[in-house]
Structures are given as structure tokens and as C-alpha cells.
Amino acid sequence: MEYNIAVVKGDGIGPEIVTEAMQVLDKVGERFGHTFHYQEVLAGGCSIDANGIPLTEETIEICKNADSVLLGAVGGPKWDEVPSEKRPEKALLGLRSALGLFVNLRPAQMHKALSDACPIKPEIIGDGFDILVCRELTGDVYFGRHYRRESDKGWGETGADDMNYSVYEVERIGRRAFEMAMKRNKKVCSVDKANVLETSRVWRETMHRIKDEYPEVAYSDMYVDNCAMQLVRNPSQFDVIVTGNLFGDILSDEASMITGSIGMLPSASMNESGKGMYEPIHGSAPDIAGKGIANPIATILSCAMMLRYSFGLMAEADAVENAVEAVLDAGHRTADIAAPGEKALSTSEMGALIRAQL
Ligand code: NAD
């Protein structure tokens, strides 16, 4: 099969890590008989430098027409002073909205070989954990009306943000979460604040209605404050966590951090037709950009998610994940995950070792 991928290398370490990931995809293509065509486009700081804006119509069109989008990272100190509407990060919001990406999937998995990096005690982690946080991306308080008014209590100027969730939006993300769980360990935990918020009561009622469509999946509800505690108390109880935009923003970062290694974590944002934008969760790491020492694994695992979720290439996705696992098991490390005194590989050495496993 042939696949067209729009590639946004972006800023900082973006070009270094995406180059390795593209070579991994090419190796997958060679082994499994696929061809990946790449069209490179600018977005973020490099687009500001070239075009004066972080995201052009041309980039949007190419990304819309591609089968999938691979993104490195955008931003950096060079563009810190530009006005907020022109910041590199606006490119991400613009792409998400142009592509209609409504769900963000973030796996947080502890690789056994890296258990020393996990900040949680070994007796709590046990055999490790493998969580998929499914965060709604286009609704909630982030997209409600933001305004100021006089306080009802006579306390002066007051900021206000409207929080909304429609039944339609909850059904859409809820079904996606159940479908993901069916391909994993068949558990969904829906996180809300239904003891306080009306938005959450609509969320919970809707989730309860659709859970009956997936009788094989074990369903539970959890309040967000409890979930924040449970993630560090007993992370292995979770399989798929589904939640709104605000709670998901916070919980997905927490779930990532308990793995202990930011350079290892991939993500996918998808629309209704299954098109996705795949990117590492970390930023452009300006402190190490250009040194050839960034960890390419998060981006390579993002490609595995692309193969699985956008192209339906399960064996190919497994092959990439197994190759990463094998390289880690053999003790190879980039600087960010190496123990003190341990030999650290360069970005390209790590990429080459992973390709050699394929
Ligand atoms: P960051 O994730 O770029 O870096 C945090 C720390 O982690 C740094 O010490 C960095 O060196 C390290 N790190 C990150 N990725 C690594 C990798 N693959 N290998 C080894 N080490 C790695 O976060 P930050 O420093 O807060 O942000 C830097 C810039 O990136 C900012 O301009 C920010 O706005 C932007 N940013 C972009 C995205 C994105 O494009 N999706 C996400 C977050 C931050």
C-alpha cells in the first residue's frame, strides 16, 4: 500500500527526531511492502521566519490532503517575544482545528527496562502499567465564552469562563474510548466532577447510556480529584481513562510524568474519519537542539500509533514497538534515560539500532 504523510519537522530538536522516525517508517515499508510518501511543510517558529506567520493556508491544505500528519515540535526562545496571536504554538491549535481533531490519545506505559526512572516506589508499580488517556480536545471550558463581569458579591472585577459539554460531544469521545478499550484490556474509567458540575452530570449520564453498547468492557466512573491520587497510588488499575479537555490536560501530564521519561512518550490526535496528527508529547527542547543527543523514541512510537490507528497496520505497529523494547532491553540509552556514568547514544545511533531490530 502507499500512504501520503505530511511532515512538520518544526523547531528545536524537531528536525533531528523526525528524520530518524521517517527512516524507521521507510524500514517498515521495506519489510512489509508499503511505500510512505512524505511532503514536508513548515509550521511554528520556522514558518514565522519564512512566512511571518506560524501556520499558512498552504500547510493546512497539504495536511488536510495527506493521509496523516507527523509532527516534531514547535516553539523556542527565539519566538518568545512575538505577539501571542502569532506564537509558534498557535500552529498546533490551528492544525487541530483545521483537521477537526477531537480526541487526543496519550499512552503512558512504563517500559520494564526503564523502571528506575519511574518516580513511584517499585512495590506500587509492581509489573508496570499501561494507561491510555483519551482526552477530549475541542470542547469544555477552553472553548466556552471567556469574559469579565462585576462580582455578584460586590468584590469587583471577576473573570469567568463558560464550561460546556453537549451530549453529542460526549458520545463521540466516549465511543472512541470504548473502541480503544476493545483493542486493549477492555476497561474504561470515565473521569468527571459530577458531584459539583452540571457539565459533568451530562458527561456521566451520557457515558452510562453508551456503556451498554460495549458489554465486554468493564466500566467505572471516578471523580477527577480521586483519579489524580489513584494515578500515583495504584496506576496499574487503569487501562483507558476518558475525560474532558481540562481534566485531560492535567491528568495526561500526570500520567506521563509517572513513567519518568518525557523523551519516550508518543501521542495521537484524531478526527472522526480516523485521520490523525502524531507527535511526541515533549516540546522542542531548545536546550539540546542541534547537539544530536535528543531521544527519538517518542517520535518513533508516534509513528507506531500512526500505523495502528490511521492505517490499520497492526503487525507493523507491533514491530516498531517491539524493536524499541528490544533496544531498551539490550541496555541502549540516550542521555535523557541513561543512568549516571552509563554510555549515552546519539539520536542517530538510537534510530539506527531501532531500525536494525526491524
Ligand atoms: P520540552 O519538552 O521541550 O523540554 C523539557 C525538558 O525535557 C528539557 O530539558 C529537554 O531537553 C528535555 N527533553 C524534551 N524532549 C526530549 C527528548 N526527545 N530527548 C531528550 N530530552 C528531551 O519543554 P519546554 O522546555 O517547556 O519547552 C520548550 C519549547 O517547546 C517551548 O517553546 C514550548 O512552548 C515548546 N513546546 C512545544 C510543544 C509541541 O510542539 N507540541 C509541546 C511542549 C512545549
Image (tube, rainbow, N blue to C red):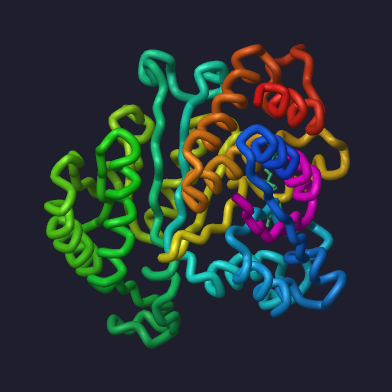
- Residue 269 percent across, percent down from the top left: 50, 57
Q: Quadrant of residue 146?
A: bottom left
What residue lies at 33% left-to-right and 55% top-to-bottom?
176
Number of marks in the rendered image: 0
Indicate whether 250 appears above or below 297. below
Q: Residue furthest bottom?
A: 150
For the residue pair 65 and 285, the one nearer the viewer reads as 65
Residue at 46% across, 40% down = 107
In the image, taking residue 53 as reference, residue 142 lies left or right, namely left
Q: Quadrant of the C terminus?
A: top right
Q: Residue 30: give x, y in percent of width and height.
A: 69, 36
Q: Is residue 162 placed above or below 172 in the rendered structure?
A: below
Q: Which residues are magenta?
A: 1-20
Residue 197 position in % (x across, y down):
22, 65
The picture quadrant where one finds residue 39 is bottom right
Taking depth in this image into account, of 102 and 194 the one nearest to the observer is: 102
Image location of residue 273, percent across then percent down: 44, 65
As displayed, is residue 313 above or below residue 88? above
Q: Residue at 13% of width from left, 45% of height from top?
A: 215
Q: Is residue 302 left or right of residue 202?
A: right
Q: Say left or right for 37 vs 174.
A: right
Examine the rendering and report whether any part of residue 263 can be seen: no
Name the image quarter holding residue 271.
bottom left
Q: Is residue 6 magenta?
A: yes
Residue 268 seen: yes
Pick the front one: 68 or 155: 68
Residue 257 belongs to magenta span: no
Q: Is residue 123 found left or right of 286 in the rendered image? A: left
